[in-house]
Amino acid sequence: MDHHVQHSKRVNLSHMLVNQLLTKRALAGDKEIALRNRAERRKQHAERMARICTEEIHQVVVVLHQQGIYPRSIQVAKQLNNSHILRLKEARKI
């Protein structure tokens, strides 16, 4: 009977170790997926902001030029839907 108890303990220990290993692998996979998703969201955000900056700032600059106004950043900011766009590095490239 002592032999059966030891065998049972070893089997239980083996199951625990396998479960721990599988759990660690699953968590590592979840982290990898989360990191990929976060990177994709950041990329989409950057693309969206670049598009907004380019389109909206360009439109404002054209309108200011048509009005005979030099498009200084203050003038452009006053015309934007969100004047904080000019703080973004994407907007400063334009």
Image: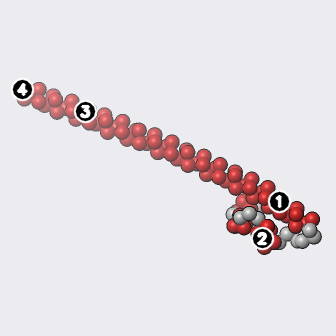
Q: Is residue 11 left or right of residue 61?
A: left
Q: Is residue 1 left or right of residue 22?
A: left
User: Which of the 4 image quadrants contains residue 23?
Assistant: top left
Q: Give the residue number, with chain letter if any, for mark 1.
A: 58
Residue drawn 77% across and 70% down? 78
- Residue 92 in view of the camera: no
Q: Mark 2 against mark 4, which lies toward the viewer?
A: 2
Q: Between disc 4 and disc 3, whose residue precedes?
A: 4
Q: Give the residue number, with chain letter if any, for mark 4.
A: 1
Q: Give the residue number, with chain letter if any, for mark 2.
A: 78
Question: Which secondary structure lies at badge 1?
Answer: helix
Q: Mark 1 against mark 4, which lies toward the viewer?
A: 1
Q: Between disc 1 and disc 4, whose residue precedes?
A: 4
Of the pair 57 and 89, the residue shown nearer to us = 57
Question: Which secondary structure lies at badge 2?
Answer: helix
Amino acid residing under circle 2 = Lys
Q: Between disc 2 and disc 4, whose residue precedes?
A: 4
